[in-house]
Amino acid sequence: MSTISSSMSIKHGISLWCPQSPSLNRQHSGVVYSRTRSLHRRNFVVSASSSFANENREFVIVGGGNAAGYAARTFVEHGMADGKLCIVSKEAYAPYERPALTKGYLFPLDKKPARLPGFHTCVGSGGERQTPDWYKEKGIEMIYEDPVTTIDAKNQTLTTNSGKILKYGSLIVATGCTASRFPEKIGGNLHGVHYIRDVADADSLISSLGKAQKVVIVGGGYIGMEVAAATVAWNLDTTVIFPENHLLPRLFTPSLAQKYEELYQQSGVKLMKGASIKSLESGPDGNVTGVKLENGSTIEADLVVIGIGAKPAVGPFEKAVTLNSTVGGIEVDGLFRSNVPGIFAIGDVAAFPLKMYDRISRVEHVDHARGSAQHCVKALLTAQTHNYDYLPYFYSRVFEYEGSSRKVWWQFFGDNVGEAIQIGNFDPKIATFWLDSGKLKGVLLESGSPEEFQLLPKLARSQPSIDKVKLQNAASVEEALEIAGASL
């Protein structure tokens, strides 16, 4: 469940605002503290009690996903959560590591699937498991299943679906994304058609998998590949349909994609490349029965999973702050400040300056959700003024259930630009290096050792000059990594 969207270079017309560092007053319990910071933060008197007897909250996070969980941890680490922080979520659960939903969560019950509370944040990064009790113990107010519907930025007020009114001092928007859907007129809402974005979605899919026989997955990206790997464990007839010429075209080269396609086909998954869908068909009972292609053929299905990307969930904030028209999302600077004082955006919904590549990007990935949350909160609460310097990182882990004949785990760091050099035979290792003007820009490694995986971000961030011929002549992935490592 990962993607990156990028706009043109900053120097080619994207302007960023950098507000002057104001002298800010922060007020608790009637006592005023003065602190000079780099951030434009707005304030008001709040109750000292963690019970929030009135509508005032010093800090409010809207959204209950990964970014919110890691932001909460950072508030706690700085002693600024108890009685001061409120998280408003549309979900029924405390923040959790969302990648699990298309990986271990979809395993059959006899193959030890992941379940909550096992993957609440922040276990994905080796941190403490933040269960609902953790938030209570830290004095953090959690509002579940009550999404924000309107915002009055001038009066710093939020209204939720239930009518609850929340007044904030500083607002962090961490609403993530919503799954892109098929239009209703072509069957996007039929019974048996599934989208995956939260636990409720995944639970619904699991219920259907237990009764299904023929599954069609629409989309050849992260979601499509991960769901297809899971359906193999259910021993279901599975077809993946996508319009591109190969799997994961945003990242994989054709030759690299071929290796993974062969693995999926050997596992029984049918791939329909270059196919366009006309509509989803249904029977008299309203259940999906098949996928009709533009060429007139129909693929039978009693379960369809749509994995065609996601859209930033700007919702009620789209008229309150500046949105980026190129990559979507809320436009922010290197400290995650929007153009409105006191409003910040982090995670999938933020369009931020990707410093090392000099462009505006929006990244849908758990690593960025964690990093942006921590950076934003630290900048908000301390004198930290350095801009976020993110290194793009993507990974996938599939076929990891018990009894699988081949487990897949790859990692990618950097930028997939320039000429791609592929080393290895996928037995199990394979690596791809992207070189541009003699410099290493990005690297992907399948089935690496911990030490080899640790080398990848060093290479991608350093962008060393590498002898292309020497790299091409490497006899193994290990030798290629030694050549690249020596260039550091």
Image (spheres, rainbow, N blue to C red):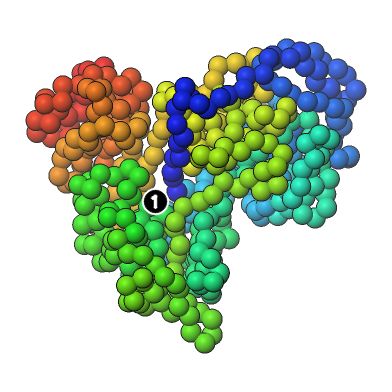
Question: Number of callouts in the render?
Answer: 1
In the current view of this chain or complex, which residue is farthest to the bottom? 284
Determine the residue positioned at 74% across, 24% down. Answer: 41
Q: Quadrant of residue 34?
A: top right
165 relative to 374, above or below:
below
Residue 52 in sight in this render: no
Q: Position of residue 57 (x, y in %)?
A: 80, 35
In the current view of this chain or complex, which residue is farthest to the front? 13
Crowd rating for badge 1 (residues with CA inside 10 Å; few <14, some 14–19, many 20+): many
Determine the residue positioned at 60% across, 16% down. Answer: 385
298 relative to 129, above or below:
below
Judge by depth and name the residue closer to the eye, 76 or 416: 416
Name the residue carrying label 1. 222
Residue 286 in sight in this render: yes
Q: Position of residue 256 (x, y in %)?
A: 23, 46
Quarter of the picture holding the C terminus: top left
Q: Position of residue 260 (x, y in %)?
A: 25, 52
Determine the residue positioned at 54% across, 20% down. Answer: 387
Determine the residue positioned at 52% across, 27% down. Answer: 14
Q: Position of residue 72 (x, y in %)?
A: 65, 35
354 relative to 233, above or below:
above
